[in-house]
Amino acid sequence: MAPDRNYFRDRTQQLEYRYKQAKANQLESKVDLRHDFTDMEAQIGRAKMPPSSPNVCPECWIMRHREVLLEPVASDDPSRFDRWICRAKDCGYSEDRRTGLK
């Protein structure tokens, strides 16, 4: 099962809000943040277009444009869910996926 589609919707909303706040702050402080805005726009675009594989870390995909595969690890209750983690040093994303066994 792929990461929940709500994850991508929620991340899109968070990133769009952060983008709007940064734009407002730029107008107030007159600081040039073009590079930051370019990064934010790209992140919003990736959040709206999930990666082709359900096993790609969504956080690495959205924030860093990297396709890092999630790895399965032992979960607390393997009859109910599998835990998948990102091993990228700068990430730490994890998710639990229902197994459908119970």
Image (cartoon, rainbow, N blue to C red):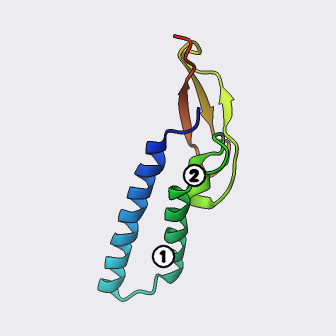
Earlier in the chain: of badge 1 and badge 2, it is 1
Task: Specify few, some or many for label 1: CA neighbours under 10 Å numbering under 14, 14-19, or 20 or more.
Answer: some
Question: Is 62 above or below relative to 93?
Answer: below
The structure residue drawn at horizontal position 67% and vertical position 44%, both measured from the top left corner, is 53
Q: Nearer the viewer, residue 87 or 61?
A: 61
Q: x%, y% of residue 11?
A: 44, 53
Q: Are marks 1 and 2 in contact (CB under 8 Å)?
A: no
Question: Residue 69's quadrant in the figure?
Answer: top right
Disc 1 element: helix
Q: Is residue 21 left or right of residue 95?
A: left
Using the image, determine if residue 23 lies above or below residue 80: below
- Asked whether 6 or 32 is in front, the reply is 6
Which residue lies under the disc numbered 2?
50
Amino acid type at circle 2 is Pro
**Relative horizontal placement of residue 62, taking residue 66 as reference (left or right):** left
- Mark linked to residue 37: 1
- Element type at marker 2? loop
x then y, percent, for residue 25: 33, 78
Pair 1/2: label in front: 2
Q: Identify the amino acid type marked 1.
A: Phe
